[in-house]
Amino acid sequence: MKNHFVSIIIPTYKDWPRLELCLNALKKQSYPQDHFEILVINNAPIEDPLPKKIQLAKNCRLLIEKLPGSYAARNKGLNECKGEIIGFTDSDCIPDLLWIENAVNFFNKFPKYQRMGGGIRIFSKNKLPSFVEWYDYIFAFPQEAYVRSGNAVTANMFAYKEVFRNVGFFNDKLMSGGDYQWGKLANKNGYKIGYAPESFVNHPARSTVSELVKKAKRVGEGQAMFNTTNRGSKYNRSLAYLKLVKPRFWEIKKIFAYYSDGINFLDKFFVVLLRHYITATGDYAKLKYENKK
């Protein structure tokens, strides 16, 4: 089984405590340490430098990117990396100890794929999640569905470097959705993607409504930025928004069909309300941005 040299790219923005947990997990990887490198890209280098208490491993390099945005930071890593295979995760993720090994095994076992989306497992701060955290358990990172549509989120994505050479890098003007846009281009160029749930990272559930709102706004604006379809007048776009905010019964069914120890009827009821609020917030952010055009 071939041991490819792998580059792991991790953008970070004022998130050193969680990044330290991520790096500690990478120090314990089953994959040989001399067969992979870690590139951490600080996206707030002036106001938030690396704390002295964080000791980087020998195979880890710290880069800086002043241009705002995680995709600009990832592009910095792509310019500097040496790996044949490129892996992406986020500073708040904790990779499984077999994460890299299982990703490389996937490519060795299935040579028809040039890209891979790995599993993303949600965990909560407390033993019993709040209804806000349950929201992320149910709706955050449906990676398998993303892969079926030809994409993968960069919380856990691998690809051969040659794909980036031929397709290009991420759109650094986007604050959200750059992985989706890049995935569409990769599909268009014939690069296939597969799903590898055994190559997983652990991602913390968002614990406050404000965190969910912030993400929804960022995603909505990101969708508006790369959506080049003519959607008609502001009036027609507003009518379309009103249609979107009506109850989505399939999502309600999904919430009440969700089973896990600890989630009760009241939690599910609050998740239903939260889902509609978050969805409406994201769609409204998209509408506002489109109306500025």
Image: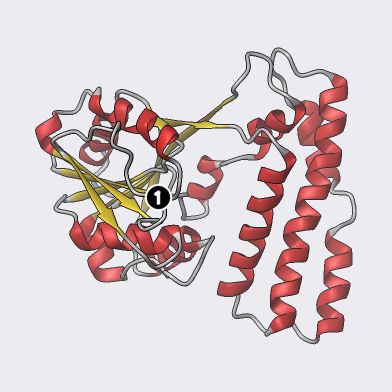
Q: Is 276 or 109 nearer to us in this picture? A: 276
User: In the picture, which quadrant includes the N terminus?
Assistant: top left
**Which residue is found at the position 44% from the left and 33% from the top?**
18
User: In the picture, which quadrant includes the C terminus?
Assistant: bottom right
**On the rendered structure, is 169 left or right of 203?**
left
**Which residue is found at the position 55% from the left and 45% from the top?**
145
**Residue 243 x/y as whole percent:** 88, 64
Q: Provide the secondary structure element on which disc 1 rests.
A: loop
**Residue 79 x/y as whole percent:** 22, 63
**Which residue is found at the position 28% from the left and 30% from the top?**
26
Q: Is 155 or 247 nearer to us in this picture? A: 155
Q: Is residue 2 visible?
A: no
**Residue 176 x/y as whole percent:** 54, 60
Q: Is 126 or 286 nearer to us in this picture? A: 126
- Residue 50, placed above or below residue 138: below
**Residue 267 x/y as whole percent:** 82, 25
- Residue 94, placed above or below residue 244: above
- Quarter assignment of residue 19: top left
In the picture of the structure, the residue carrying the numbered disc 1 is: 48
- Quarter assignment of residue 241: bottom right
**On the rendered structure, is 128 left or right of 170?**
right
In the rendered structure, which amino acid carries the disc numbered 1?
A: Asp
**Which residue is found at the position 86% from the left and 40% from the top?**
273
